Amino acid sequence: MSKFHKQNHTFRTIDLFGLVALVGVTGTVFGAILAQALQDDRPQRARFMAEALGKQLYSQHVRANLPRPENQRGPASAQIPAPTPLTSGRIGSDPWGRPFHYLVRTSIEKGSAGKIFVWSDGPNGESDTPLSVFEASQAHLFVPYGDDVGSVEEIPEKN
């Protein structure tokens, strides 16, 4: 074999450092991608979905309580009677595939607002929040118990 065809196959220290750096960078990138994929964002999505459903129920409540002019003719679309506002039940579907619960509490006290509660039973599918939480009139903030996730919308007082 000639000297021209003979190749030098040595592995130097600089090659080792380059290989370690390449493996480290590749591992970090794949680790970050895997960690992002494994992170469960369903509780956050459930909270956003509960807020959106609460706003929809609120707009239905407002629409159902709008004053209707008796002797004035309005647009044709206004002649359609507003639906009766929902007071409690199940609506939509949470990220775990189960329905959201909702409860509309209107206040009978002068100067206080009613509330629309929307919540999910969370990952375990069991309701951890007792109904007494919704009946407490001094509750300004809805904090579900256990792994339940939810939101509250305030209904302003009619003037």
Image (spheres, rainbow, N blue to C red):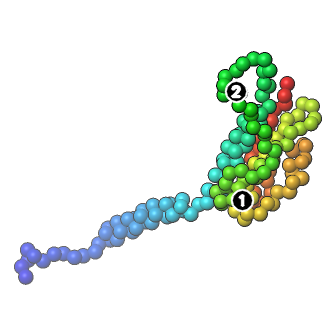
Q: Residue at x 18, y 75 (%)?
A: 8
- Give the quarter of the image for residue 157: top right
Mark toward the start of the polypeptide (2 vs 1): 2
The residue singled out by tag 1 in the image is 122
Give the amino acid type for the residue marked by disc 2 in the picture. Ala
Q: Which mark is residue 5?
A: none
For label 2, the SS is: helix
- Mark 1 falls on what kind of element? loop
Tell me if I can see residue 139 in this picture: yes
Above or below, 10 against 68 in this view is: below
Q: In this orientation, which residue lies closer to the viewer: 119 or 29?
A: 119
* Residue 24 rendering spot, x and y as whole percentages: 43, 66
Q: Residue at x 88, y 34 (%)?
A: 112
Q: Residues within 10 Å of mark 2 (few under 14, many from 20)?
A: few
**Callout 1 amino acid:** Gly
Q: Pick out the residue farthest to the top.
A: 72
Disc 2 from disc 1: Cα separation: 39 Å
- Quickly name the residue at label 2: 78
Residue 74: quarter of image: top right
- Residue 139, compared with residue 9, is above or below; it is above
Does residue 141 appear in this view? no
Name the spot of residue 42 as percent of width and height, x first.
63, 57
Where does the image place residue 115, in percent across and percent down from the top left? Answer: 82, 41
- Residue ID at (42%, 62%): 25
| Towards the viewer: 156 or 28 | 156
Circle 2 or circle 1, nearest the eye: 2
Quarter of the figure with the C terminus: top right
Mark count: 2
Q: Residues within 10 Å of mark 1 (few under 14, many from 20)?
A: many
**Image point (59%, 60%), residue name:** 39
